[in-house]
Image: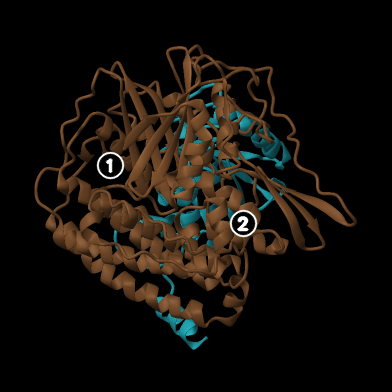
Amino acid sequence: MRREVLKRENWVPAARAVLERGGRLVALWGSGRRQSYFVCAAYATPEGLVWAELPLDGGATYPDLSPVFYFAGRMQRAMGDLLGLTAEEALDRRPWLNHGAWPYGYHPLLSNSSGKEVFDDCDVTDYPFVKVEGDGVHEIPVGPVHAGIIEPGHFRFSIVGEKVLRLEERLGYTHKGIEKRFTDLPPEGAHLLAGRVSGDSTVAHAWAYCMALEDAAEVEVPARASWLRGLMLERERVANHLGDLGALGNDAGFAFALTQFSKLREDWQRVSRVVFGHRFMMDRVVPGGVAEDLNETALTLMREDCAAFGEEVKALRVIFEEHAGLQDRFIAAGRVRPELANRLGVTGLVARASGQAVDLRCDHPFGPYEQLEVRMATHRNGDVAARVIVRFEEVLESLRLIEAICENLPRGAIRGEVEIPVGEVYGAGWVEGWRGEVFCGLELAGGKIRRCHVHDPSWQNWPALEHAIMDNIVPDFPLINKSFNLSYSGHDL
Amino acid sequence: MLKTIFRIVRTGILTEPAPTVYSLPEVGRIHHELLHILGRALCIRQVDAGSCNGCELEIHALNNPYYNLEGYGIKFVASPRHADLLMVTGPVSRNMEMALKRTYEAMPDPKLVLAVGDCGCDGGIFGESYASCGRVANVVPVDLTVGGCPPPPVEILRAVLGLARRLR
C-alpha cells in the first residue's frame, strides 16, 4: 500500500487519472485526527493499492468525486452523517445513514462524541424519494421489513403496469455504529467486530482487518497461516454460492434447486463445523495468523469432500442448463451491459458477469494466491443467467483451489507475533471475498485504533442494482436482487 | 426432466433417519414433540432488526431438507398479521426500532417473541450506542432468547419448542 497526501486542486484530477489508467475507486471515507479532518480514498491501480488523502485544513468541505466515480455519492453522504464533512457541489446531499433517530448535527465519529449518546426524543423521519410522474405511474414501497428472511432495507419502485421505470433504494436501517465501536476495542481484539460486519463474509472481513493490522504493525504472517486463511475464504465462497444458486432457482419457481443446494450447503457447513469448530468459520482468522491448526485427517476429509461436491454441482449445472423454464427467467433479466458496468464501477462477481475482468486473486494476488494461479470466471451478458454461470464456475474453481491448498499446505507456524506499535501507523487490507473486494483502512495511534474503515463491495454494487431492474417487471425483482445478493449490514455498518 | 426426477428419487427423504455429524436425532424428537404439543401449524414472522445476517443464514437453514421445518407445519409467513411467533435477530438498530415495534403491534395475540443470537440476547459485540438499542427486550417484550453467534439451527429449533410449550 502506498499512501499519498494530495493537494485540494489535485483531488479530482487524481481520481480522473486513476480512471483513465484503468484503475478504480475501492473505498472513500473520512477521518478526524487531532481537530483536523482528512478525506481518504483507496484506489486500485495497475501497480497496486493507493491510499490518497486530502487534508481539509480546518474546513469541512472537499471536492465532489461522484462525477468521476458514480457510486462515490453515497459514500460521501455517509461521510456527511458520520463526520459532518460535505462534498462541494454534490447534487444529492440527503442524509444516508442518519434516518432521524439521532440529531442531524450529531456526528458520531467526531472526537468529542462518545458514541454512547442516546437521543430519546428523536425518531426516524420520512425520506424525500425522487418522484416519477406521468400517466399511470404509481409507486410500490417495499420494506424495511421484507416478506422473507432478509435483511432490512427500503425499495421504492416507480412503475407503469408491471414495468419498473425507476427503483430507488434507501439503506442504512442496520446501521449500528460499527466504525465508532472499533475505536473502543483493542487493535488485537477488533477482528471479532470485523468478523461481524457481514455474517456471510466473516472470513473476508476478518482477513481484511487482520491484513490491515499486520500491515500497520509490520507483522510477518507465516505461510501456513496465510494458506489456511485462503482455504477458509474459498470455503466461504463455496457456501455462499451454493446458497444463492438454490435461492435463484427457487425465485424462478424451481423449488427443486433450493432443496438440492440447501442440502449441499448444509453438508458443506457441517464439514466446516467439524474441521474449524464453527459453521461459518467465525473468529478463525486472528491477528498474526489463524486460531487453530488443521491435522492431516481434516485435510484429507476436505480434499475428498471437494471431489464429491464437484460431481454434485456439475450434475446440478446440467439440470439448470437444460431447464427451459428456468433459463427463460434467467436470460436477459436484470441486464447490466459491460459499458454500463464499467461506468458504474461495479465489482466482484457482478462485474465479472458483465465483462469486467477484475479479481484481486488474479490481479493483485495476496496470501497463497500467488502460487495458486486462480482462473477468473467471466461472462459478457451481464444478466441473471450470466451471474448464475459465473457462480457455477467459481464454485468449481474454489473446489479446485481447496484441493490444491490441502495438498500443498506449507508446514510451520500458524501465528506470527503481533506487537502493537505505539506511534502513528497506517495499514490497509484488501481481500477478494465471495461478493467482491473487501477493504479495510486502519489507523493506529498510541497503541489504539483511531480510525478503522471497513468497506464491503456492496457499496459499489447497490447503485448498479437500481440500473439492472430498469425496464424489467416487478416479479423479476427478487430474482435479480438475489443474483446480486448484496449485504445490507456490510453497507450500513 | 428425467435427470431432475432421478435426482429427486436418488436424494430421497433426508429428514429421517438422521445422517452423520451432530445432534440430528434431536431434530426428529423435537419435531415429534412439537406436533404433539401444537397439533396445528405454528407461523413465524422473522424480523432482522440490525443483525450481521449470520443468524438469518442459520434461520434459513431450518428450511433445508435436514431440519425440514415446513414439513412439520411450522412456517415463516410474510405478514405479522398471520404470525403466532415473532423471531427477532440483531441488536435493534435505532433505525429499525419503529419498524420492529410496528411489526409487533400488528401481530395477533399471544404475540410470542423469540430473540435469536447473542446480539438479540444482550446486544452482543455492538452493545448500546447512539445507533443501537442493544438487546431485543429493550424494544419489545421477549418470551425467550437463544444465544450463540450465530446459534446453530438445532438450537433455534429447540427454542421454538420451548416457546410452544408455554403456549400450551
Q: Which chain is cyan?
A: B
The chain under label 1 reads A
The chain under label 2 reads B
Q: Can see residue B138?
A: no
In this rendering, would A92 be left or right of A234?
right
Q: Specify the label residue A365 is tagged with.
A: none
- The lab-note entry on whether marks 1 and 2 share a chain reads no
Image quarter of residue A235: bottom left
Type of amino acid at the residue the image marks with label 2: Ala
Label 1 belongs to which residue?
A: A285
Q: Badge 2 local density, few (<14 within 10 Å), some, or many (20+)?
A: some
In the depicted view, which residue is nearer to us: A75 or A387?
A75
Eye-nearest disc, 1 or 2: 1
Residue farthest toward the right in the current orientation of the protein: A135
In this rendering, would A389 be left or right of B39?
left
Type of amino acid at the residue the image marks with label 1: Val
Residue at x-position 23% and y-position 24%: A420
Q: Badge 1 local density, few (<14 within 10 Å), some, or many (20+)?
A: many
Residue at x-position 58% and y-position 64%: A337
Q: Secondary structure at mark 1?
A: strand
In the depicted view, which residue is nearer to us: A274 or A139?
A139
